[in-house]
Image: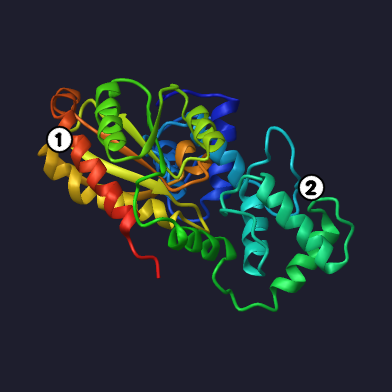
């Protein structure tokens, strides 16, 4: 894209200038040069996106979301759901004072709507589920009395992990792959089923659709498999946002990284928190395992299934006290 010019590029540059207050200098001249590419890369790194220097659909959506500040607009449950940094700010404030909006993920869903209505009811405001000026003013006033305790959403998530069965047997695992790793998904499914585990394979090419399907099934854990056709390595991602992260996802990602690279004889790319759509939109502990090269991964599908199932077993047996 270097050399592209126009109003769209200038809009991207203006938004980057607003979001990136320090660091890479950005020219707002409508010309996509090296400085703009570096700024996009800095933004992608900051937001837990894939760092490629290209303002594709996901980066653009994140850039738009980053421009919203709490109070800029009314926040409420609608379809499609509102997304933005203002929503994450609202969720964080509610969670800080004990009203559970679910994960602080910047998506105004049902849990956030319930938490907001409960807050309004408790402080004597009209219960309309809308974060307007009066509700935000009362929320900020009450939040100022708290000394940043742990988010109630994190406490709740840890309690769910602590009270879950210390075995995978009888639990429901979703395996999602979007092309090229069907044999690996099948090998893992067969191995897990043999241990008394319910397994559903998801193959839709759209990550958001896979996330929605997993949510509708109310699975206990989601393992996404993606092919990296060029690099002989394994790296595993879990959901992490500005204010919150998936504790269960982090542990599973770390356990997978301890077992899979050695089983395949490939490099350890590490576990990292990211805000990719699949990880952000699933409502259960989820990981995205990216593997390559294709020939080696498919050839050693049975070894990979053993390593992944072992990591899942250790994850289920972990202590969350």
Horizontally, residue 47 falls left or right of residue 216, namely left
Horizontal placement of 98 versus 203: left or right?
Answer: right
Whether residue 10 is visible: yes
Q: Is residue 173 left or right of residue 184?
A: right
Image coordinates for residue 288, horizontal then vertical, percent: 36, 39
**Which of the 4 image quarters holds residue 287?**
top left
Q: Quadrant of residue 177?
A: top left
Is 208 rendered above or below residue 203?
below
What residue is rendered at 31% in x and 34% in y? Answer: 193
Judging from the image, what secondary structure is the residue with disc 1 in?
Answer: helix
Q: Residue furthest left?
A: 265
Instruction: Report x, y in % for residue 79.
Output: 72, 33
* Secondary structure at numbered mark 2: loop
Q: Is residue 151 above or below residue 209?
A: below
The residue carrying mark 1 is 303
- Residue 227 visible within the image: no
From what the image shows, is residue 306 above or below residue 8?
below
The residue that mark 2 highlights is: 74
Query: Taking 102 as reference, is 137 left or right?
Result: right
For the C terminus, give its image quadrant: bottom left
Near mark 2 (Cα within 10 A), the count class, few <14, some 14-19 or many ≥20, is some
In front of the other: label 2 or label 1?
1
Measured in 3D between alpha carbons, the distance from the residue under mark 2 to the one under mark 1, in whole angstroms, is 52 Å
Of residues 141 and 217, which is closer to you in this image? 217
The residue sitting at 27% across, 33% down in the picture is: 188
- In this view, the residue in front, 145 or 289, is 289
Picture residue at 88% right of the left edge, 66% below the top: 124
Nearest the eye: 272 or 195: 195
Q: Quadrant of the N terminus?
A: top left
What is the x, y in percent for residue 219?
A: 47, 40
């Amino acid at each position: 894209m270097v050399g592209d010019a126009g109003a769209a590029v200038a809009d991207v540059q203006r938004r980057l200038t607003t979001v990136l207050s320090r660091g890479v200098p950005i020219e707002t001249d409508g010309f996509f040069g090296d400085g703009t590419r570096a700024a996009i890369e800095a933004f992608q790194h900051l937001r837990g996106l894939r760092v490629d220097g290209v303002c594709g659909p996901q980066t653009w959506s994140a850039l738009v979301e980053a421009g919203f500040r709490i109070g800029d607009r009314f926040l409420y449950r609608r379809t499609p759901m509102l997304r933005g940094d203002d929503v994450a700010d609202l969720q964080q404030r509610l969670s800080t004072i004990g009203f559970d909006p679910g994960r602080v993920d910047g998506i105004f869903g049902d849990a956030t709507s319930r938490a907001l209505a409960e807050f309004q009811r408790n402080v004597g405001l009209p219960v309309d589920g809308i974060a307007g000026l009066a509700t935000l003013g009362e929320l900020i006033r009450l939040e100022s009395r708290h000394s940043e305790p742990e988010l109630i959403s994190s406490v709740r998530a840890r309690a769910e992990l602590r009270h879950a069965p210390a075995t995978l047997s009888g639990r429901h695992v979703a395996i999602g792959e979007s092309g090229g790793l069907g044999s690996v998904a099948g090998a893992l499914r067969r191995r897990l089923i043999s241990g008394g585990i319910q397994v559903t394979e998801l193959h839709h090419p759209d990550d958001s659709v896979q996330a929605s399907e997993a949510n509708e099934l109310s699975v206990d854990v989601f393992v996404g498999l993606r092919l990296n056709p060029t690099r002989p390595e394994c790296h595993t991602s879990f959901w992490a946002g500005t204010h919150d992260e998936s504790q269960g996802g982090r542990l599973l990602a770390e356990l997978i990284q301890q077992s899979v690279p050695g089983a395949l004889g490939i490099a350890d790319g590490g576990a990292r928190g990211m805000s990719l759509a699949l990880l952000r939109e699933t409502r259960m502990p989820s990981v995205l395992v990216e593997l390559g090269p294709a020939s080696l991964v498919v050839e050693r599908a049975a070894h990979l299934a053993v390593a992944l199932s072992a990591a899942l077993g250790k994850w289920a047996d972990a202590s969350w006290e």
